[in-house]
Image: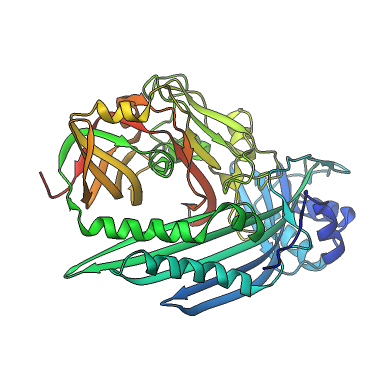
Amino acid sequence: MSLPVTSPQPSHRRYFFEKFGITERLLERCLGEALSAGGDYADLYFESVTSTSLGVDEQIVKSASQGTSAGCGIRVLSGERTGYAYTDNLSPERLLHAARTAAMIASGPAKQLVQGFTETEGADLYPVPLGGFDLDLAARLELILRADRAARAYDSRIVQVRSSYSEELRRILIAASDGAFASDTQPLCRLNVFVIAKDGPTTTKGSSGAGGRAGLEQFVGSKSPEHLAQEAARGAILQLGAVAAPAGEMQVVLGPGWPGVLLHEAVGHGLEADFNRKGTSAFTGLIGRTVASTKVTVVDNGTMAGRRGSLNVDDEGSPTQETVLIENGILKGYLTDKLSARLTGTANTGSGRRESYHCIPMPRMTNTYMLAGDDAPEDILRSVKRGLYAVNFGGGQVDITNGKFVFSASEAYLIEDGKITAPVKDATLIGNGPEALKYVSMVGNDLKLDEGIGTCGKDGQSVPVGVGMPTIKLDKMTVGGTGR
C-alpha cells in the first residue's frame, strides 16, 4: 500500500491567498465594513475542508463519500451581543456583503480599523500530508475490511459487523480587528467497528474505535484494525454471559482512559466560562473553593501532539494551552474564549472553538483529563469489599445547571472481596458532578487517554475532543441496575 509522505506544518496563509485570491487588503476592508456601525471587535474565519468517509456493513460497501467545502464566517461583538453572517462564496463582493450583515448588530460611531496584522505563531502538534490527503479509496477500504474480517474470526457468535473510516483535512485562516492573524492545517481521522453477537435468545453489541490528528500513514502505524475489531467483539461476547447489575449506593472504581468521558460531561462542561458568566453552571462563583477531593487535579490541554482534541491555534486564532481547572480539589478557573475573557476580565485560555464557518465560536474543551495519583490500580481494587468496576461507557446525560448526571456503563464488573468477578449488564451511574468528585479516595498511577474517538456536542455544535483519567475509587456512588 503506497502512503503519502508527511511534512511539518506549511505556510497555511498561502493556501487561502493563492486558491481563493484572499489578500490582506481584502481582510482589512471586510473588517472595516464589519465595524462600520460600531461594535467592539470583529473577526473573519475562513475554512476549507476536504473529507472522505467509507462504511462497510455485512462485508458490503454501503457508503462512500468524498467532498470539499469552503466558506467564511464574519462576527461582530458589541457588548454581550453577537452579530454573525457567513458565506460559501469567497468573492470580495459576497465577503463584504456578509461583513455588512454582521455589522447590523452594532450601533454607534464607526470604528477605525487597525492597519496590518500580527501573525500568531502556533505550535506544530500534527504532521500534514504533503498536498493534503491523497484520494486512494482502496487503502481506506482495506482498513475497514481488515477490521470486518478480524471481528468475524473472533467468535462464531458474532453475527453482524459494521465498520467505518473517516478523515478530513481542515484549513483555517483567522483575521481580527485587534490585529490578530493566524492559520492552521488540521488533519483528523477515525476508524470505528460495531458488532452484534447472538447466543440463543440473547443479543448483545460491542464497539471500538481509534483516531487522532493524523493521516492514514500515522494511523496504520499506531492503530491496528484487527485490535479494534477484536476489542469490539470481545465486548459483545462478554455481555452474553453478564449478570444483572446490582442497584444501590456502593463503592465504584472507574478504569483508566475512556471513563474520563464522565469527567468531561459531569464536570468539564460546567467549567466552560459562558455557562459561568451567565450564572447557569453548578460551578458558578466557586473559584477558590473546594469542589473535589484533595486527590483530584483536572486539566484541559490542547497542546498534546497528535491527540484528537489538540489544536495549534483555536478557532479565534489564539494558541491553545494547558489550563488547570481543578488543583488538589480547589477550583482554579474556567475555560474562556475572547468574548467571555473580555466580559469577565480574565485571561483567554485559547478555548474558542466552532464546528464550522457556519457557527459562532464558544468556550469548549480540548483534551480534558485527571492527573495520575500515587495508588497502584491493583491496590485500589483490593480495597473494595463489594462494589462496581466500570471500564467503558456508552451514552449519558448531564444537567449543567445542577451537575446531575446519568451514565450507562457498556463494560462493567462486580468487585467482591477485592477481586474482579462477574461481568454485569445494564449498569448506570447516577450522581452529581461536583459532589461525586468529593468522594474520590484513591487515584491510580496509570493515567491513560482515550483512543481518539471523542466528539462533544454543545448548543448544536459538535467538535472533536479527548478525555482521560487514571483508575480512581469513589467511596460512594449510586448504581442503577436490576440485580442485587
Question: Quick one: 160 or 312, which is closer to the camera?
Answer: 160
Q: Residue at x 22, y 30 (%)?
A: 418
Q: Residue at x 41, y 25 (%)?
A: 296
227 horizontally vs 171: left or right: left
Question: Compared with residue 289, is residue 210 higher up or lower down, i.e. above or below?
Answer: below
Q: Residue at x 72, y 68 (%)?
A: 134
From the top left corner, tell me how far across and down residue 294 is, in percent.
39, 19
How many discs mark residues in the rendered view? 0
151 horizontally vs 332: left or right: left
Query: Can the viewer see residue 71 in this picture?
Result: yes
| Colour setting | rainbow
Quadrant placement of the N terminus: bottom right
Furthest toward the left, the residue is 484
From the top left corner, tell me how far across and down residue 29 is, in percent.
84, 55
Corner quadrant of residue 193 = bottom left
Q: Residue at x 28, y 68 (%)?
A: 157
Corner quadrant of residue 281 = top left
100 horizontally vs 230: left or right: right
From the top left corner, tell me how far across and down residue 286 is, in percent.
43, 24
Question: Compared with residue 305, is residue 15 higher up or lower down, i.e. above or below?
Answer: below
Corner quadrant of residue 303 = top right
Quadrant placement of the C terminus: top left
Query: Can the viewer see residue 477 in this picture?
Result: no
Question: Quick one: 5 or 14, which is closer to the camera?
Answer: 5
